Image: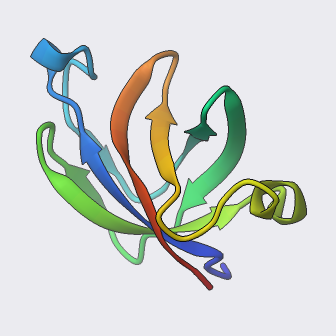
Amino acid sequence: MKIDALISIRFLTSEEGGRKSSIQADKYGCPIMVDDRGFDCQFVLTHSMCFELGESYKIPVKLLNLDRALEHLKEETKISVWEGKIIGVGEVVKIL
């Protein structure tokens, strides 16, 4: 799968309003939010990963509607990760 961007995300703890448990997955998809706009993405993982709450990760992503997303996503754009609520915050590190 082609990587479109690299994002840096800190997953919120349960106390901060994030998930109740870590994310254990070999593939994971979610919207990246910029203000009130959501852009579906797939984390590009080469093996099963565990994303712990309260920790930060640099994650390669595939944007499912690249042209539309690139109108709003630039390097250093502040983003959040959405799963029915905000579960992580960060920024775009690089557009590839």
Q: Is residue 21 left or right of residue 42?
A: left
Q: Nearer the viewer, residue 76 or 44?
A: 76
| Residue located at (41% from left, 77% from top) | 46
Query: What colour scheme governs how the chains and residues are painted in the rendered image of this protein?
Result: rainbow
Q: How many marks?
A: 0
Vertical side of 73 occupied by 17: above or below: above
| Residue located at (49% from left, 45% from top) | 79
From the top left corner, tell me how far across and down residue 23 is, in percent: 28, 41
From the top left corner, tell me how far across and down residue 86 is, in percent: 42, 24
Q: Is residue 85 left or right of residue 38?
A: left
Vertical side of 89 occupied by 67: above or below: below
Q: Tell me the quarter of the picture where residue 37 sits.
A: top right
From the top left corner, tell me how far across and down residue 41 is, in percent: 64, 52
From this viewpoint, which residue is outermost toward the right?
Answer: 67
Vertical side of 39 occupied by 9: above or below: below
Q: Quadrant of the N terminus?
A: bottom right
Q: Nearer the viewer, residue 42 or 94?
A: 94
From the top left corner, tell me how far across and down residue 29 is, in percent: 56, 46
Q: Quadrant of the C terminus?
A: bottom right
| Residue located at (15% from left, 37% from top) | 53
| Residue located at (88% from left, 64% from top) | 67
Q: Tell me the quarter of the picture where residue 19 sits.
A: top left
